[in-house]
Amino acid sequence: MSHKKKQRQTGQRAPASNKHYPKEECGIVGVYNVEEAANHAYLGAYAQQHRGQESAGIVSSDGERLYRYAGMGKVADVFTPQKIRQLMGRHAISHNRYSTTGASFLRNAQPIRFESRLGTMALAHNGNLTNAQTVRRSLEELGSLFQTTIDTEVISHLVARSRADNFTDALIEAVTQIRGAYSLVVLTGDTLYALRDPNGFRPLVMGKKDDGFIFASETCALDIIDAEYVRDIEPGELVVVTPRGVTSLFPFAKTSQNLCIFEYVYFSRPDSLVFGKSVYNTRLRMGEILAEESGVEADLVMPVPDSSSVAALGYARQSGLPYHMGLIRSHYVGRTFIEPDQKIRDFGAKIKYNAIAAVVKDKRVVVIDDSIMRGTTTRKIVKMLRNAGAKEIHVRIASAPTRHACYYGIDIPSPSELIAATHTIEEIIKYLRVDSLAYLSLEGMQRGAADIEGGSGNAGYCTACFDGKYPVRLDENEAIYSNQKTLFSEYEIEESA
Amino acid sequence: MSHKKKQRQTGQRAPASNKHYPKEECGIVGVYNVEEAANHAYLGAYAQQHRGQESAGIVSSDGERLYRYAGMGKVADVFTPQKIRQLMGRHAISHNRYSTTGASFLRNAQPIRFESRLGTMALAHNGNLTNAQTVRRSLEELGSLFQTTIDTEVISHLVARSRADNFTDALIEAVTQIRGAYSLVVLTGDTLYALRDPNGFRPLVMGKKDDGFIFASETCALDIIDAEYVRDIEPGELVVVTPRGVTSLFPFAKTSQNLCIFEYVYFSRPDSLVFGKSVYNTRLRMGEILAEESGVEADLVMPVPDSSSVAALGYARQSGLPYHMGLIRSHYVGRTFIEPDQKIRDFGAKIKYNAIAAVVKDKRVVVIDDSIMRGTTTRKIVKMLRNAGAKEIHVRIASAPTRHACYYGIDIPSPSELIAATHTIEEIIKYLRVDSLAYLSLEGMQRGAADIEGGSGNAGYCTACFDGKYPVRLDENEAIYSNQKTLFSEYEIEESA
Amino acid sequence: MSHKKKQRQTGQRAPASNKHYPKEECGIVGVYNVEEAANHAYLGAYAQQHRGQESAGIVSSDGERLYRYAGMGKVADVFTPQKIRQLMGRHAISHNRYSTTGASFLRNAQPIRFESRLGTMALAHNGNLTNAQTVRRSLEELGSLFQTTIDTEVISHLVARSRADNFTDALIEAVTQIRGAYSLVVLTGDTLYALRDPNGFRPLVMGKKDDGFIFASETCALDIIDAEYVRDIEPGELVVVTPRGVTSLFPFAKTSQNLCIFEYVYFSRPDSLVFGKSVYNTRLRMGEILAEESGVEADLVMPVPDSSSVAALGYARQSGLPYHMGLIRSHYVGRTFIEPDQKIRDFGAKIKYNAIAAVVKDKRVVVIDDSIMRGTTTRKIVKMLRNAGAKEIHVRIASAPTRHACYYGIDIPSPSELIAATHTIEEIIKYLRVDSLAYLSLEGMQRGAADIEGGSGNAGYCTACFDGKYPVRLDENEAIYSNQKTLFSEYEIEESA
Amino acid sequence: MSHKKKQRQTGQRAPASNKHYPKEECGIVGVYNVEEAANHAYLGAYAQQHRGQESAGIVSSDGERLYRYAGMGKVADVFTPQKIRQLMGRHAISHNRYSTTGASFLRNAQPIRFESRLGTMALAHNGNLTNAQTVRRSLEELGSLFQTTIDTEVISHLVARSRADNFTDALIEAVTQIRGAYSLVVLTGDTLYALRDPNGFRPLVMGKKDDGFIFASETCALDIIDAEYVRDIEPGELVVVTPRGVTSLFPFAKTSQNLCIFEYVYFSRPDSLVFGKSVYNTRLRMGEILAEESGVEADLVMPVPDSSSVAALGYARQSGLPYHMGLIRSHYVGRTFIEPDQKIRDFGAKIKYNAIAAVVKDKRVVVIDDSIMRGTTTRKIVKMLRNAGAKEIHVRIASAPTRHACYYGIDIPSPSELIAATHTIEEIIKYLRVDSLAYLSLEGMQRGAADIEGGSGNAGYCTACFDGKYPVRLDENEAIYSNQKTLFSEYEIEESA
């Protein structure tokens, strides 16, 4: 109780704690008019597994009825051939969800399916709404009953309460009442909707497979099923696919374009096109610019694998220093990994990484990482490299300092935990115990993306986590309300069969 | 499709197929102000396991927050000590649910918990509403989203939509909009409600344990936790237990009393008091009257175990014939039992029963059963007894012929499947291949109950499944709608972690 | 360490603690030349589920190769249709095992299968060897490696080490080296052996099904698959079934016949023939004799269900008192049942039983039980009946006082825990708080069996647990060694996939 | 049947099919006198996860008793904190096992533990015996019963049958009867043995942790627990660690040294020292020599990730061509991955790999792979790169052509399936549809290793899989016998709880 009060007094505008409120960092797929649609939706979700490993779900349609299955865990663990076979029909949507601490319940798994006056509908969402709590509260006042703790559920209630006489109008009515970041795929018996919010925070692409259509967060989900990339869904565009064909609607007022630049830094797969550009090439170019901006005399360049490997390669190319893999990353870390007891725990980071003494011993090394959040992992890696004999350690970060919360679907710690928000570069250098540290400039990031052909991103990225310029603000009472929600989450007990 | 049409043409007033629509034949428990309330609710549910084995759930309250856990299966399989410990607090309600083929999903498990404008509430229901679909449809029209396929959920939506400014008024407002059979226990942070519908179809008792209160469907749930039986909740009574004490309200218009007489015939445990009378003694007395009404010359009396054992004992007492256990029933039949392949299946009923030749060989036997639905099981048992050498077989049924559907929470096959609704006694005798057959008269049943002291049941039982006199009718469109629901159920896939 | 030493000093001749050493109280089935043999073996094991619920296993043969599957738990839980289908062939043996505390491991599950010089063989055993440790120790000295902690494994090593040039001779050579109680079914590619030890402690019957043969511990396993009872395997008889026909061998020296009389008292199903007599009728007759021997003035007779129901019926017949079911037994008690915490535990026995006040209130009741071991359960039941209002309680036991350990396969507590071994009747009456107590005389038990037609048991029963007259003694060092084994068991960790 | 005959006629000397006979490609760890030994053994096994993912097991010792737990799957999935806590004591050994199709049973999981005349012993084995079947057959003739289908079990039987009066002599007696490849760790109550076969096929290192000792296959298992690398166990050396200290014995006749060169090519982790040399540097050097030997004009160099990344880096350094990651590898492929149905399967390899068009489009690429077995994966990758737009594809293999079976513990397909054994370079080029193909020379491989400091490997590697020069031959009848065993495996049904 006193805790709640304290929140109200001190932190009214503070962003929701990322530990508790489940952000929607996810991958979505839509499949229309393709044989064994559920199997394709499964493979697409599998290709986008890096976007979320907490839960996975598929809803399919045989043109009339919707079949659903979802479970906790990775795509390949949730589904069996039998389950896939039961998901009949030529249309399907899938979802995989990012794992955050706390409210990790099966009933929060997407796609959500619901019945309304107009029939049955299913919905998968990537993003985060900035007025979810406000809308939820007012719906609850009107007597709506919520079954999940995810923001996505408000969309379904808005659709259900619409007085429109068809699904398309009801969906438009619903989404014009929500704000924030949302890429959506929505399935009814015979119609598939694909929608990006007006700012276009999160990606969504359209592809072609035989006579059918595929929608996905990233093109790697098209590649795995041999679908051809057609184009990006535009910010504010609602694509409607029916047996009669494809329609494109723009139901929103025009607004600024704000593509999430963090997708290039870390989130997307390097083999994907995101916002029309190759993630690999963009990341490589940012590494080159990082070397231009912050070169240093050294013997070799090495990444913190795997997410920084391409940027490190760019840095090595530009600087002329040899590229080496001085850190090995284990791919076997799973949910149930047993942390060693206190006494033997201080070797900590070796569970995930090991330094190769034969590479770094007596060497001056440039270590490339994509970003620094709390700094604790970087510090452990630096210590490990020192123990392996590195003579000098120069850390270079392939993005600008992360100093602000994200309201649009990336799970960034609260500013009070972000080392770049609370410390100067000199203090960070001291904390990490490195010989030097430099970040890529925000301008450098934008130039890095602009230098790569394709897309229209140059007209506008969201860089709020770096510069605090939020294109869409949180509603006044979002933060507090979501903190109350976290209290709610704490007394849930996970339900199972 | 054609099936649906046929339903519409021929069966608009036909009851929903019992195979698909999950009837609420269940056991409920409420615990207020008792240490380790969840543990007591667990034991109460365990004692009432015979009332439902499909799923089990508990919601507890620490005075402020509600904790929930539910799962598929029997009480003792669903809960672990760890789960029970997590269900904190001094108040709790529990539910166990009857297993019907079809829509057996975790999300249909009770108690249901929901958040409303007024706070969090949980609810466990025994019974069946006769206007659930009508209410649901109108709520859906208003934009309510339903998450389960159980009738109970309409109550939560009605509470949520109430404009009343406290839970008690909102609950009263909700229940005055529903019709049919319902015994309910409802839990908020610090209040427990126990409610019986105005007709009093299903039982609900009140007990005392130390300084606290226990509510349950049958007194056997009081016995297992050493609680003392106080009295029955009256038809139409709403008992409200708060930290300030116990209040009794009667929010309904007066109507007829219609206690389910089938509770005595089969459903309740013989060691319970139901509607104030000993089930054992009532069943014994009905067996005696059956012997009076339809005595026959024979060598011995034997029950179809276990539900008919007491009635058979009554028959034996009255007739003077020796009582024997000529059939053994296996208690190991479980969910996963493997039916033998077609070729070896015709020995069928031996999986559950075996006849003892040493008892029945060359004997004229009177076989007592509590009721006959389709007649298939009885036929198999008769065949088994013939093969074991019985010379004559006289079947006596300790209830009247079951000819009508039940709308109030007992899972009785549809009339078209009830042998007594479609065949004469002579035809049934021929079908069963017995030497004689007689049922207890309806008057005999009522006299049987009246002869036993206690309760006020004599003023009115529901005997609709025997005589078709329904105290509360189904809404016009209930049947059809619920048939549509069954189609819905068929394309559900069970969800799990 | 000190514990081990103490054992050696004080308890050299003491029987193994029944808590730890897994006794072979089990059910076995053999199927030869029947379609879907594994399915029949499964059903037979299912019918004999009461003989052991710890684990279940089947080995089948397609005439050449042996297929095996076994698991922990009840038959119906261990097997799936898919597993049964994988167990191919027209021959099969099955086993289900009694649950004892302690060494409950999957690798102890039977049938055991092993490869030897002569080919592959599988073996299922009901009984207990009295020289298992002696033989095991000498085999270990010779370099044999043991994989289980069950006595049965020594038989397989003896077969493997035999220099005989065929399976039949090797098996005979092996079994002539073991002593104690054993009914065995043994399967090779195309031969089925059924064998009873020379004293005939445990039952084994032979049946006919179409052109094939069925062997089982009890006839209820024949009934369930519609097989016809042919005869008992005789003590010391080895029946060999091959494609060429059935042979009967008697490889042992003649010795006394010692059929386990406890099978009638408690262990066998009432619908079985055991040692050629109806268990139902034998149990009924013993109840009658008990009434003759120890009649008492009372208002009613009631059993402790379910095992004493038939004896109570016999007592009621003979005494003329009315028979009633004053105790209800729950059939839902499972492995995972959560014992209530200490504070609410003293109502204890109500989990399994509940007294019916409506039956016993103000009544003088005769309570029939089959036997008393420690007396704790009886004491709780008596207390429960007193609380339910019984005026007088007279306990009558349908067997003689149990005072000695069993070395032949029944899990009887050690004499120090047997109340009849350590207390006089008067002391027991005081402990149980009953008004009177009487046991059936040993002579009465034997007369009870003799009065029933069939079998040859009258020539000799094993009554060692009642009178301490052991037909086959334990080897000198069996007890100590098995105590060491129990220490071994304690540091086992159950292995699983 | 006909299959068996064919095997006998054509393939008497052919190596066992690698599909069925479980080769011992594994990782082993030994921990002596370290707190929470099981936890350290767990972490060591976790670091060596790449050496085997089929099963994992640990045996610990508290100085007297041995505790065992093993399960199917990866280390992090098999063990829970509770299981680790149950594995008490300061000594432990662990094992993880390679996954081969077929005989994947829990009972084949290591370490194996057995009791013998001398006490309890546990054993973990990396390698493959060349006379396992011969020894097993002769032990079976003597009456030994085998419980697993792994070659390791013969060692335990040889120990058990030894007449020596202490474990050290019994172990020496046993291992002098076996031939082939074996690195072993063996644990009794208070003694740990670490042993390498006389040829030294498989690696085994010794490390120091506080006052205790660690043994492991690779140094990465030392790194993860902060243990210090001391030295390699020498070929033919038996290290004995007791409470009194460390002894080194050389019980074998002197023979040639034959270290498995394939450990450098593929099997070991790049951050390990193996045979005293850095795997990273050796692999890098081999890549450089490959470029020297088989340079080609091109635009970029890229690896088939992850195993070829270091060699590709070496090739890029030497050739001056830019290094790129043109293929992305998914790390989420698990056991239960659902293969798409036939119709959509031909995109096959994309499940595991995806080509990045932005990297390879219109480029002449050099693709580095560590080795080619059947060629099917390489062919799919080539097709994928072509579809992504690569103009020229030059494949360079960082090892010599693999043409022969391995009898020493590496799971290499049989020669009839090895493309280099059955096709010329030109034919392979045609099959793969590449522009050119070259292998590293055998001499280049050996020079690559020799150029790296440390170790004594230069005196002798096993290169049998490349040149067919087997240091230790298979026994005459090994191959045939193991083929019979595979038939045995086929009618096993996996057993579980």
Image (spheres, coloured by chain):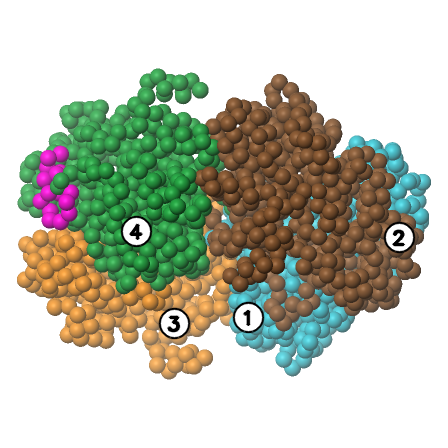
Chain colours: A green, B brown, C cyan, D orange
Quadrant, the N terminus of chain A: top left
Q: Residue at x 22, y 32 (%)?
A: A471
Whole-angstrom CA distance, mark 1 to mark 2, is: 55 Å
Per the image, label 3 sits on a secondary structure element best described as: helix
Tell me if mark 3 has few (under 14), some (14-19) or many (20+) residues whose alpha carbon lies within 10 angstroms of its own. many
Residue D110: tell me if it is visible: no
For the question of whether residue B426 can be seen, the reply is yes
Residue at mark 1: C88
Does A444 appear in magenta?
A: yes
Give the class, few, some or many, for how many residues have Cα within 10 Å of label 1's Cα (few <14, many ≥20).
many
Asked whether the residues under marks 4 and 1 belong to the same chain, the reply is no
Query: Numbered disc 4: what chain?
Result: A
Name the front one of labels 3 and 1.
Answer: 1
Q: Which residue is denoted by mark 3 in the rendering?
A: D478
Q: Give the labeled residue for mark 2.
A: B293
Q: Residue at x 80, y 37 (%)?
A: B459
Task: Give the image location of residue A360, x and y in percent.
Answer: 16, 42
* Residues drawn in magenta: A442-457
Disc assigned to residue A240: 4
| Element type where label 4 sits in the image | strand
Q: Estimate how packed mark 4 is, as few (under 14), some (14 to 19) or many (20 or more) residues with alpha carbons within 10 Å.
A: some
Q: Tags 3 and 4 in contact by the CB under 8 Å rule? A: no
